[in-house]
């Protein structure tokens, strides 16, 4: 499998440190506003990667932090006249709820404020090893002590002035804060350097090494994090451990709105909770994954409606397949059927090939639509049960990665389908006996439960509305 490494900007073959385990750390949100669909895009991208890796047999451990103390949280609390922790607690709860509703599986959500001791310890070790220095109660990382600085982002340190308020106390303008000295009115923790709070970058180095050890396989986030955040994380961590920290640096392109990055600070967000209630998790995931993660996506209502229709087409194909299978029994496949079966198998292996190519969910999805086309143009008429079983398996595999049709593959649904089929059979009998009052009543009852019956001369079929 090939993955694109931001470090070196090239495709590399994927070989995790340990043969069966993938350790993944994704930078989570700063919780001062609602989680939005831009976050959704990035978090779902890593979710699909994890799911695919799990299908391949890896044990994936995903850690994603919550930044629950930061300038932006403090400012928001001031604006609202609330305490900083009221703000961060409210938004982190909302974040966890909605990212869960989006079916993003994260194993651990460590928060900065419950890891202050570990952060202080990390900073102290950087000071002890000569990579950091104390100035006026703050601690800065001495960038000149890490020769690899700039390799990840290709940004020259000399060209970067962090724009800190008190630059004078830094040895170089490009040094960055590991620990910020207390300012009146701000939250603080006690430390060997006096009262203060952690800088932004140090939290991810600390929490990642705390839970995943000193070597991780995938570290990622949105593209905006390459510089300075990940460049700084890398410098601190590798200075401390003395060895390569991350094997693959992976970054997701932006979700944009009116061609601009969607972000809390720009005030142009579509909250995830709104999008979830309007479109549901599956349509959102489908849209996010219909582009490869390194290509930007532009938000519009039309694109979501179109995604919903495309997804429905896949679900309709599954209904056709289920009917063919239920109808059975399997007959000996004709030559034509075998050709169709082979076509389906080829489409399924193309799905894999695209996923193996840097998680190209976009082309992988195209292969799945090819199967749907085969269902509608061929299987529907040939009613070849073997072909239908192969195709259904392809859809199942697709869903294990995309998680957009979970209802279609639940055991519950299997049972429900059988019950509805039985009711339809009774109704067909009633219609044959011209007992239309009763059969109409059944149709109305089913319709109220979201089951739409389609009558034709040959009999009746049904689908979920
Ligand atoms: N529009 C977006 N598209 C893709 N990923 C995004 C987008 N916005 C944020 N992310 C990613 O989500 C994670 C959390 O980001 P963060 O909390 O900084 O969000 P934000 O809205 O950009 O906030 P801010 O405006 O304060 O920077 C990061 O990995 C970030 O790269
Ligand atoms: Zn981070």
Image: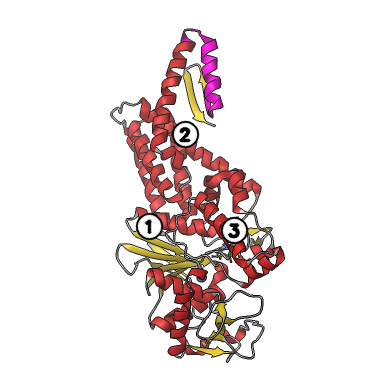
Q: Is residue 145 left or right of residue 241?
A: right
Q: Nearer the viewer, mark 2 or mark 1?
A: 1
- Could you tell which of marks 3 and 1 lies nearer the N-terminus? 1
Q: CA distance from mark 3 to mark 1?
A: 33 Å
Task: Give the residue at mark 2.
Answer: 376
Asked if the magenta segment contains residue 120, the reply would be no
Query: Under tag 3, what secondary structure?
Result: helix
Q: Nearer the viewer, residue 42 or 73?
A: 73
For marks 2 and 1 on the same chain, the one whose residue lies earlier in the sequence = 1
What main secondary structure does the magenta stretch of the protein show? helix
Q: Is residue 383 visible?
A: no
Question: Which residue does the numbered mark 1 point to in the structure image?
Answer: 53
Quadrant position of residue 262: bottom right
Secondary structure under the numbered disc 2 in the rendered image: helix
Image position of 104 (left or right of 157): left
Write the residue at 55% across / 11% down: 437
Cβ–Cβ under 8 Å for marks 2 and 1: no
Residue visible at 59% across and 65% down?
A: 85
Quarter of the N terminus within the rendering: bottom left
Asked if residue 317 can be seen in this view, the reply is yes
For the record, the magenta segment spans 432-452
Q: Is mark 3 within 8 Å of ligand 1?
A: no
Q: Which residue is mark 3?
A: 90
Q: Position of residue 374 (x, y in %)?
A: 44, 38
What's the CA distance linking mark 3 and mark 2? Answer: 48 Å
Residue 365's place in the image compared with 387, above or below, is below
Which image quarter is the C terminus in?
top right
């Amino acid at each position: 499998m090939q993955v694109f490494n931001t470090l070196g900007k090239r495709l590399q073959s994927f070989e995790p440190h340990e043969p069966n385990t993938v350790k993944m750390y994704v930078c989570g949100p700063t919780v001062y506003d609602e989680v939005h669909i831009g976050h959704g895009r990035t978090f779902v991208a890593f979710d699909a990667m994890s799911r695919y890796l799990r299908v391949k047999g890896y044990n994936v451990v995903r850690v994603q932090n919550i930044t629950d103390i930061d300038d932006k949280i403090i400012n928001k609390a001031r604006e609202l006249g609330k305490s900083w922790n009221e703000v961060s607690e409210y938004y982190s709860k909302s974040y966890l709820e909605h990212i869960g509703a989006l079916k993003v599986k994260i194993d651990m959500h460590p928060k900065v404020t419950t890891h202050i001791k570990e952060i202080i310890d990390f900073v102290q070790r950087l000071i002890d090893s000569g990579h950091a220095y104390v100035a006026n109660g703050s601690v800065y990382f001495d960038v000149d002590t890490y020769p690899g600085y700039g390799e990840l982002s290709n940004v020259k340190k000399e060209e970067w002035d962090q724009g800190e308020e008190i630059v004078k106390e830094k040895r170089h303008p490009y040094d960055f804060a590991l620990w910020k000295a207390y300012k009146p009115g701000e939250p603080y923790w006690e430390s060997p350097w006096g009262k203060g709070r952690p800088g932004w970058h140090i939290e991810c180095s600390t929490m990642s090494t705390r839970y995943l050890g000193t070597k991780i396989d995938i570290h990622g986030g949105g593209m905006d994090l390459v510089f300075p955040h990940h460049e700084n994380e890398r410098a601190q961590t590798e200075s401390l451990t003395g060895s390569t920290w991350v094997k693959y640096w992976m970054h997701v392109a932006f979700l944009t709105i009116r061609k601009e990055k969607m972000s809390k600070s720009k005030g142009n967000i579509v909250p995830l909770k709104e999008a979830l209630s309007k479109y549901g998790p599956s349509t959102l995931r489908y849209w996010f994954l219909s582009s490869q993660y390194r290509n930007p996506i532009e938000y519009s209502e039309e694109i979501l409606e179109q995604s919903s229709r495309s997804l429905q087409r896949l679900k309709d194909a599954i209904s056709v397949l289920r009917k063919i299978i239920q109808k059975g029994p399997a007959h000996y496949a004709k030559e034509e059927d075998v050709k169709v079966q082979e076509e389906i198998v080829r489409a399924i292996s193309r799905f894999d090939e695209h996923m193996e190519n840097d998680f190209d969910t976009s082309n992988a999805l195209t292969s799945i639509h090819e199967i749907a086309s085969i269902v509608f143009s061929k299987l529907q008429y040939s009613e070849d049960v073997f072909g239908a079983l192969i195709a259904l398996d392809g859809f199942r595999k697709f869903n294990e990665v995309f998680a957009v049709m979970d209802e279609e593959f639940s055991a519950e649904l299997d049972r429900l389908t059988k019950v509805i089929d039985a009711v339809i059979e009774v109704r067909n009998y009633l219609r044959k006996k011209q007992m239309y009052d009763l059969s109409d009543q059944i149709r109305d009852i089913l319709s109220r439960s979201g089951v739409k019956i389609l009558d034709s001369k040959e009999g009746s079929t049904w689908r979920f509305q």
